[in-house]
Image (tube, grey):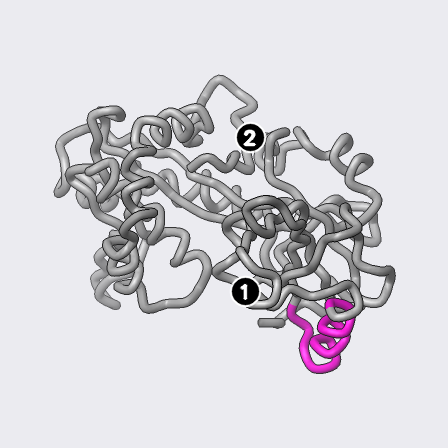
Amino acid sequence: MLSPGLMEASTGACHLVSDDWCQQTYAAHEHVLHRLDENPEPLHRYLAAQKSHRLGFYFERLLAYWLERILQADPFCMNVPVFQTLKVTGRKTLGEFDFLFAHQDRPLLQHWEATVKFYLYCESEAGEARWLGPASQDRLDLKLRRMFEHQLRLAETAEGSVVAERFSALAVNASAFIKGYLFYPLDRETEVHSKHTGASPHSAFAISPAHLRGWWLRHGETALPKRCADSRWWVLTKLSWLSTACCADEKSAGLLSDAEAEQYCAQHFLHHRSALLLAELRPGADGWLEVARGFVVAAGWPDAGRNAG
């Protein structure tokens, strides 16, 4: 909730869950999170009901806990399908509401579409600027277009409005909840950031200047960049991509030296094309804490990233 959104509204019309609202609601319920730190079992049970290990579903489940159990939204439902009845073939899926809920702080029936994304800046041979997913199959501009032109307008359809009215007679307010990171080519962050932050992949929205960011490089083109001489590396599993990496002990966490991290990458890319997300951690009084992160991608990325797991 405290991490900045990827996008900000560039016009008066606001269809984004704002950073201000996220910070305010966090402050109002911080005491609940402290209780969860002391006894996380309720959250663990809630997450265990989600069988998929995909990052997007994990992110949605965490957000669902926040809305349903911490904010105590009522009514609350998630992943609600909307169908169109067809005479010949039965029915067709028009879409799905990620979240439908009502809360005293937001008096309308809230329709949220939620996503967490990790995009790398890349220029095509023609010089076209693109934000691509690590597997190079996902594009920021296409994601935003679908979200704002289709997903968030689901309640405007006859079928979608009928579904929403089953949960509440309140008017529907649709908003996007977009979190994640943007990754810049190594040694070009300042140049790319000044050129393209604020340039809108969707007409009504721009990249937030406060967005979380990191670096990326192709394997073999240069050594891993370090901010601190005494730091170590941690290869992040996918469900660890969401938050700042930290650990109490270097050895138990399996942190890697520079040479060990380079060797890990070399072994990985001998057999795989999928990107690796590495966090740089520095020792402090309370253990090891992330100071930077970045993707190492295959030498032929983005073409070599396609269809990679």
Q: Main secondary structure of the magenta part?
A: helix
Residue 42 appears left or right of 255? left
Residue 295 appears left or right of 68? right
Location of the C terminus (image quadrant): bottom right
Look at label 2 and name its amino acid.
Answer: Phe
Under circle 2, the secondary element is: strand
Residue 182, given in percent of the width and then of the height, sits at 64, 45
Q: Residues within 10 Å of mark 1 (few under 14, many from 20)?
A: few
Residue 148, given in percent of the width and then of the height, sits at 46, 38
Residue 78, given in percent of the width and then of the height, sits at 26, 50
Residue, disc 2 = 205
Is residue 262 inside the magenta stretch?
Answer: yes
Image quarter of residue 180 = top right
- Number of labels in the image equals 2
Residue, disc 1 = 237
Give the Cα distance between marks 1 and 2.
31 Å
Look at label 1 and name its amino acid.
Answer: Thr
Sequence order check, earlier mark of 1 and 2? 2
Is residue 172 inside the magenta stretch?
Answer: no
Residue most toward the bottom? 271
Q: Is residue 95 above or below residue 14?
A: below
Q: Is residue 92 above or below residue 119?
A: below
Q: Residue at x 56, y 48 (%)?
A: 142
